[in-house]
Amino acid sequence: MTVRTRFAPSPTGFMHIGNLRTGLYAYLFAKKNNGTFILRIEDTDQERKVEGAVDMIYRTLETAGITYDEGPDKDAGYGPYVQTERMGIYKEYAEKLVELGGAYYCFCTKERLETLVDENGNHTYDKHCRNLSEEEIKKHLDNGDPYVIRQKVPENVVSSYEDMVFGEVSVESKDIEDGVLLKSDGLPTYNFANVVDDHLMGISHVIRGTEYLSSTPKYNLIYDAFGWERPNYMHLMPIMKDAQRKLSKRYGDANFEDFISKGYLPEAIINYIALLGWCPKDNREKLSMEELIESFDIDGLSHSPSIFDETKMRWLNGEYLKAMSPDEFYAKAEPWIEKGIDGKDYDKKEIALLLQTRIDILSDIPEKIAFLNNFKEYDTNMFIHQKMKVDFEVAKKAIDIATDALKDFDDWTEDGIKEQIKACAESAGMKSGQVMFTMRVALTGEPVTPGGAIEMAVVLGKEETLRRLAFSKELIK
RNA sequence: GGCCCGUUGGUCAAGCGGUUAAGACUCCGCCCUCUCACGGCGGCAUCACGAGUUCGAGUCUCGUACGGGUCACCA
């Protein structure tokens, strides 16, 4: 069987993580089965359309590494791939369905429809126009009366199908409404456009959110009425913000681009969301796109919603950062380091080396190195260290030792400085650890730094190192 | 409310009738160590509840509770 899957987002804003995951799974499933992955833009809802949203979809898929084989700009004979460019098609098929007995004209007014509300406030259609005679229909049509075309749901049948994730799903036809297929403005509803497009585009596997799980039998009835082959279905549980709420655009940072600008790597985001609702057979946690394709299987799909946990995504991102070569990491980190040192003349490569194992996301960088261009009065209590046996007296002595050791010293390398400090500490009768601890604080004014005293001295350079030592000495007094 | 779907630690989750109920994140402790981090080792903590089927149930069935979805000329 030729596998053809599709991702059909609506251009109504930025690309939401949950939505992206649906696209990812459709992509993985297609690639796993040597199939074709198709992008279709579902923009029939003109009211919710957002300017620039289509570009956002392209951009997101590209940086996420999800490449479609067919789409608006890659027509393989099934186009157009944008629903508003397919408008003529739907009306034609809706009329065809009427001929086939699977749909009918409905001339009910909005006012009449509004009176049809059940005790729970839900709209229900009473099939008023289902059995209009040929003459009545013709009369309305000739009058130019506005109309919609509704699905003619067969009576007393049970529509069921085998969902690839949930197994058998069935719904009785009495629970299915004669829904609108073609609106009075001549445009199709999602329900209809979706079926027609999926069929015409030869979609073999429909992969989408569970919100469609219970309406799928209704769509199947349309396939049946046309005499079309039904596709296979895979419904996906949503990604949640917490136990009750779906991840929502309103909470701000649930979209792909935001995470990218916060310093997440696209591959880490993809990896993480792939694992939300799916688990590979071997339980691996870090997988590249190729590995995801290789190990993707339906068995691993979850039957229950998953809560999005940014803490874990941070961790995963950190793993990706650590796995990079120093050069790769530097390329990614450089702009953030620049931001942190604010134009000061420090060796950015050296700084990158210190940072690589100490951050989870790139945006952690500026804060971690702020002390480099911001060194002023600090709390001297930092010098007091029980375990190290350092107090103010020891600290002053240690600073003196360090200063003396370095003021005429020129081998400004890690090894060089380290040996020099060690030697001088010992000959002064002090533990090198005490000197280095003190020196680290004296050089940074921070309780926590991305590296020890020696590394800090190397990054700061000789001149700045001596200046800060002197400054700290004064401060302790 | 009707219908549909679901429920394993705080979170992601493995598990497909017999397990000491994996693993990961988080958190805590220890080791390493000039702070932190990395790395290594260890720890806390889970089968929603009740019946049934069975020699045996997280795994099967049925109820209950809880959660989600859906009932539009939105997608």
Image (cartoon, coloured by chain):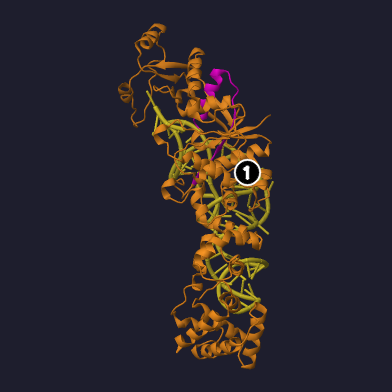
Chain colours: A orange, B yellow
A259 versus A423 height, above or below: above
Q: How far across and down, in percent of the image, does residue A79 sit? A: 57, 27
Asked whether A230 or A162 is in front, the reply is A230
The image shows a total of numbered marks equal to: 1
A29 versus A393 height, above or below: above
Image quarter where the N terminus of chain A lies is: top right
Inspect the image, locate mark 1, and give the three-letter code of the amino acid beneath it: Gly
Q: Which residues are magenta?
A: A214-239
Does the stretch in magenta take in A224? yes
Residue A48 found in image quarter = top left
Asked whether A258 or A16 is in front, the reply is A258
Q: How far across and down, in percent of the image, does residue A58 sit? A: 54, 41
Most extreme residue toward the top is: A135
Most extreme residue toward the bottom is: A428
Q: Is residue B17 left or right of residue A216?
A: right
Q: Is residue A13 left or right of residue A160?
A: left
Question: Circle 1 sits on which residue?
Answer: A300
Mark 1 surroundings within 10 Å by alpha-carbon count, few (fewer than 14), some (14 through 19), many (20 or more): some
Does the stretch in magenta take in A127? no
Identify the residue shown where x is 51% and y is 73%: A372
Identify the residue shown where x is 66% and y is 88%: A423
Q: Is residue A119 left or right of residue B33?
A: left
Camera sees residue A6: yes
Image quarter where the C terminus of chain A lies is: bottom left
SS class, disc 1? helix
Q: How far across and down, in percent of the image, does residue A387 sit? A: 56, 83
Chain of residue at mark 1: A
Camera sees residue A171: no
Asked whether A36 or A87 is in front, the reply is A87
